[in-house]
Amino acid sequence: MISVQNLSKMYGTFPALRGVSFEVPSGQVLGFLGPNGAGKSTTMKILTGYLYATGGTAKVDGVDVSEHPVEVRRRVGYLPETNPLYTDMRVDDYLSFVGEIRGVKGSQRKAAMERVIASCGLQKVVKKGISELSKGFRQRVGLAQAMIHDPQILILDEPTSGLDPNQIVEIRDLIRSLGANRTVILSTHYLQEVEATCDRIIIVARGELVADGTHRELCERLPKGAVHVELVGPGDTIAAKLSEAFPGARVEKLPVDAGQAVRFKVERNAVPENEASSDMRGRIADLAQQNGWKVLELRQGGASLEDVFRHLTYEKSATVAQGAA
Amino acid sequence: MLSDIWVVTKREFRSYFLSPIAYVVGAIFLFYGAYEFFQFIFLEAGRGAEARMNMYFNQLPLYFLVLVPALSMRLWSEERKLGTLELLLTFPVKTGALILGKFCGALLFLAVLLGLTLLYPITLAALGNLDWGPVVGGYVGALLLGASYLALGMFISSLSRDQIIALIVTVVALMLMVRLPALAAYFMPKSWIEPLMVLSPVTHFTSIARGVIDFADIVFYAAFVALFLFLNSIVLEYRKWVG
């Protein structure tokens, strides 16, 4: 169980975190999203005791990180953003070192190494030098390192950054299997990743928490996405009628492949109170029928996590000059 | 705590055997030392002098001036560059254990290099009548001197993520420390030089290397090492606040 209360951190005069609060119940896989410099890594570094917070508290299993950092670190497995590998060591020596310093003793260590080697798919490279490994394998070694002491809490800072699509899928599957019986906090830039692996999502921007909920809850916070229509009829009239029917909506003419058809995208920023968001399609169909336009396509796009992310973070990140990593 | 230190010491010690720099510098130290030593022996022996090591030990503070910074430069700089500092500092061990472990690992490697030079006194003993007293004193002094250089070098390494900068700054700092009494003599009254001499690790080394192991000298080295290891921990703690 992780509990963060009103956490703040200043890098010199730059506020990297300004009062972030959230809780992660045990067993949950939490996705931590946000643009670069939003405060994701900073939060994780504070949770693992690598940095001290300027204000607020961070607790793991009820233990305050600033008061008992060693106790907290014992419970947490951590993969930092820059994969912390001793490139001149062999994979097995490296894992053995991390196991030993984490207090996994003797025969237990051997068993622990076999366990992480198997779960991270490292069998083929155990005896190899880390410098010889591909980026995908290095990332797996980093994950194996974080799990060697079988922690109940895993903190993974961009575990899939810089990997190719196949490797991303592998690591993602691995994280999902790890998350089955552990608490995981995972930061990422890949939105599909949180959709695929996380029970819950937190979005931070400019050092503040801007959203917190399940994937579905977040998507519902945005009005349903734009409606695309393709009609055969007089383009200018159609545009005018659509604007008239939906005051305040953005009506955008889109290019068409061929023929007489015209194509529009109608997007509303807010849905009027007495309407369901899906009503637009019906009203456009009615409009077409009344005016004798032939409907070729009428499709509504749902708001994706990407839309939510951009909606919540875009303006904000644009005004942030230079975020510290 | 002790087992934590030992784990770090082992890794640090082993990593020297994976580092080409350590091999190169170690080899130069051994071969150049041997060259100087045997050249001296044959000259002295020709003049019928008794077998002694003190010529070698007199040169040691100079050899260490290059050797020790080359060993200490990577201690923290490399960790920062590789990102492994974040690994070390998020292990469930105290920062002090990391610092002591690293220091002991480097000192152990230096001790191994010094151990290889035991070849010289053994050769001497085979050739003539060797007084082992000053030799033992010389080696004890060399370890203490090396420890003091290492502590300073490791502290400087914690200040930069660039090993070369750590190397250069450490060499310059040690040079100033070694030469300070001589430099000060140019512009300070003679009565000030004496207390200044006490602050230089080399002064204490020369007195130990004569074969007189004085408790005060040992206390000096212990205090010197402790001071720089403490400063080292302050640097690491400070970074946690500043980020």
Image (cartoon, grey):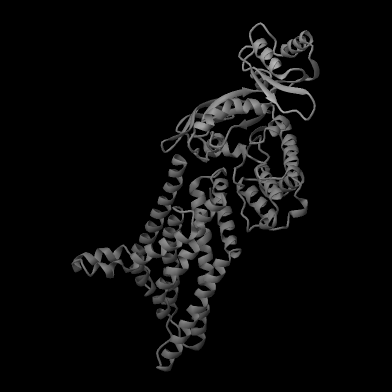
Q: Which is more toward the observer, A317 or A298? A: A298
Is residue B140 toward the left or the right of residue B92 in the image? left
Q: Is residue A128 above or below residue B47?
A: above
Q: Where in the figure is residue A66, as x and y percent of width and height?
A: 49, 34
Q: Quadrant of residue B195?
A: bottom left
Q: Give the residue displayed 52% in from the left and 54% down from the top.
A: B101
Q: Where in the figure is residue A56, as x and y percent of width and height?
A: 48, 28
Count of marks, rendered view:
0
Q: Which is more toward the observer, A282 or B70? A: A282
Q: Give the residue displayed 55% in from the left and 66% down from the top.
A: B21
Is residue A167 toward the left or the right of residue B200 in the image? right
Q: Can residue B140 be seen at all in this image of the molecule? A: no
Q: Is residue A290 above or below residue B121?
A: above
Is residue B31 toward the left or the right of residue B44 in the image? right
Q: Can residue B210 be seen at all in this image of the molecule? A: yes
Q: Is residue A75 above or below residue A220?
A: below
Q: Give the residue displayed 71% in from the left and 33% down from the top.
A: A192
Q: Where in the figure is residue B159, as x and y percent of width and height?
A: 44, 52
Q: Where in the figure is residue A248, as x and y percent of width and height?
A: 61, 14
Q: Which is more toward the observer, B5 or B218? A: B5
